[in-house]
Image: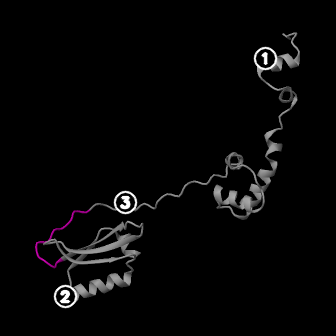
Amino acid sequence: MQSKLSITRACQIAGLSRAAYYKRPIPAEQRDAEVIDALNAIVTRHGRWGFWKCFTRLRLDGHCWNKKRVHRVYCEMGLNLPRRCKKRLTDRPRQPLDHSLEPNRCWALDFMHDALYCGRRFRTLNVIDEANRECLAIEVGTSIPSARLIRVLNRLINCYGAPEAIRLDNVLSAST
């Protein structure tokens, strides 16, 4: 049913300007065509770039599009990359621990890490005799390469003699 109101009066009642009434919206494909083309050009060259690198590249290329607009188009194009997950250790079958009663028979090596107040990270290598829980050595550093680990073990072997077994809690830590 059509009303007998004029367009001017209807726009006043609706709180809409007459220019907005007469203006036809531009389809999103046409409105965002430039952004889509620019993002496609960047993604074809740099496939693993995330949103922020692409947006920074657009700014460096001289485009001054709004961040929210570029992000909306970026998500609509399905360019979001999945977040990288931490590498998980593989499941190892659990084995009961053999507790030796004789000192210097089995040593346990353990790597620990922490951070200083300033944010700088450091690692410690602890060597413990399992029989009497005596700490044989503590080696501290920002990095403990395998050569340093071998040097510590050689020093302990010269001092205490060679153990029958050495137990590592985390084998991957020893390989780094």
> Whole-Å distance between the Cαs marked 1 and 3?
69 Å
Q: Amino acid at mark 1?
A: Ile
Q: Which residue is the site of mark 3?
A: 91
| 52 lies above or below 97 | above
Which labelled disc corresponds to residue 28?
A: none
Judged from the image, the secondary structure of the residue bearing numbered disc 1 is helix
Pick whichever of labels 1 and 3 is earlier in the sequence.
Answer: 1
Give the residue type that dot 2 points to. Answer: Cys
Q: In what element is the residue under mark 3?
A: loop
- Tell which circle, 2 or 3, labels the residue nearer the N-terminal end: 3
Q: Is residue 153 magenta?
A: no
User: On the image, numbered disc 2 is attached to which residue?
Assistant: 159
**Considering the image in quadrants, where does the N terminus appear?**
top right
Q: Is residue 29 left or right of residue 131?
A: right
Residue 147 in percent (x, y) is at 37, 85
Q: Name the residue type under label 3.
A: Asp
Q: Indicate the position of residue 60 as horizontal and vertical percent values.
A: 74, 62
Magenta region: which residues? 95-105
Could you classify mark 1 by the number of other residues whose Cα lies within 10 Å: few (under 14), some (14-19), or many (20 or more)?
A: few
Who is closer to the viewer here, 148 or 31? 31
Q: Which residue is mark 1?
A: 13
Toward which corner of the image does residue 30 lie, by quadrant? top right
Q: Residues within 10 Å of mark 3 (few under 14, many from 20)?
A: few
